[in-house]
Image: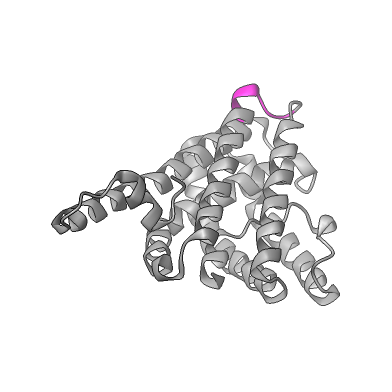
């Protein structure tokens, strides 16, 4: 599960709101890395076109991935699997609260899109946590295939959340809709990757004597039924 957490662990909402389940040393280190990662994504909040967003996502990606992996390692070093599940659930709850309270910055459409993105991320992580050990390898392979899209979802979402928390104090209002649309499009890419693997598994399972339902296929790769 540690490897999956590195890919799927939610970025804590803001450095000043770290849960007390972390040690003081981890909280201090998280605060430093979180400040760096907010600074890394802050240029996204100034984009004025989708082309500019794509260009900046590509430019920021290497540094972001390094910092995100560091956050994943810090989180998993302190938390048991049960603690991590609770932490992740609370984090996504906080994300959703921020979005729903952000009407001064987000349009109704942007709020709906971001809520869907957050729900998809939550379901994906819940599926990963509930996947049997024998299927973890398959799920990890699929997540690695769509890791670039997941990273883009993270960068777009974190940039918007950082505007909402005030951690990013200056931004281009026009950027918000581009970031929201970018997060939605990239989470769809992630979902498409899973659907492709549904088809592949279905082909492999055709040789079985008993037919295999789509629900069973989805369960095998860790998606909610």
Which residue is situated farthest in the front direction here? 210
Q: Quadrant of the N terminus?
A: bottom right
Asked whether residue 48 is in view, the answer is no
Relative horizontal placement of residue 43, taking residue 90 as reference (left or right): left
Q: Is residue 109 part of the magenta span, yes or no?
A: yes
Which residue is situated farthest in the top direction here? 108
Type of colouring: one colour
Residue 221, how many percent across, how many down?
38, 57
Q: Residue at x 43, y 60 (%)?
A: 143
Asked whether residue 6 is in view, the answer is yes
Q: Residue at x 82, y 74 (%)?
A: 23
Q: Which residues are magenta?
A: 105-110
Q: Is residue 60 part of the magenta span, yes or no?
A: no
Residue 219, how many percent across, how many down?
40, 53
Total numbered labels placed on residues in the image: 0
Q: Nearer the viewer, residue 94 or 37?
A: 94
Q: Is residue 195 above or below residue 32?
A: above
Residue 201, how many percent across, how many down?
26, 55
Q: Quadrant of the C terminus?
A: top left
Q: Is residue 136 above or below residue 171?
A: below
Q: Residue at x 57, y 51 (%)?
A: 154
Residue 203, how many percent across, how many down?
18, 53
Q: Is residue 13 above or below residue 21?
A: above
Q: Residue at x 54, y 47 (%)?
A: 123
The picture quadrant where one finds residue 39 is bottom right
Q: Nearer the viewer, residue 106 or 51?
A: 106
């Amino acid at each position: 599960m540690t490897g999956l957490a590195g890919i799927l662990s939610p970025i804590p909402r803001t450095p000043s709101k770290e849960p007390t389940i972390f040690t003081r040393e981890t909280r201090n280190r998280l605060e430093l890395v979180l400040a760096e990662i907010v600074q890394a994504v802050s240029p996204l909040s100034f984009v004025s076109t989708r082309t500019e967003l794509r260009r900046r996502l590509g430019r920021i990606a290497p540094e972001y991935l390094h910092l995100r992996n560091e956050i994943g390692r810090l989180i998993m070093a302190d938390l048991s699997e049960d603690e991590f599940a609770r932490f992740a659930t609370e984090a996504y709850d906080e994300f959703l609260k921020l979005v729903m309270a952000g009407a001064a910055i987000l349009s109704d459409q942007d709020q709906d899109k971001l809520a869907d993105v957050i729900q998809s991320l939550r379901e994906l992580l819940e599926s990963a946590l509930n996947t049997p050990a024998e299927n973890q390898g398959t799920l990890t392979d699929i997540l690695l295939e769509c890791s670039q899209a997941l990273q883009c979802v993270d960068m777009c979402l974190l940039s918007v959340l950082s505007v909402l928390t005030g951690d990013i104090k200056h931004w281009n209002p026009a950027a918000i809709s581009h970031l929201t649309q970018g997060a939605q499009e990239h989470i769809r890419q992630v979902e498409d990757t899973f659907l492709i693997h549904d088809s592949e598994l279905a082909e492999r399972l055709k040789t079985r004597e008993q037919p295999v339902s789509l629900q069973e296929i989805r369960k095998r790769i860790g998606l909610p039924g």
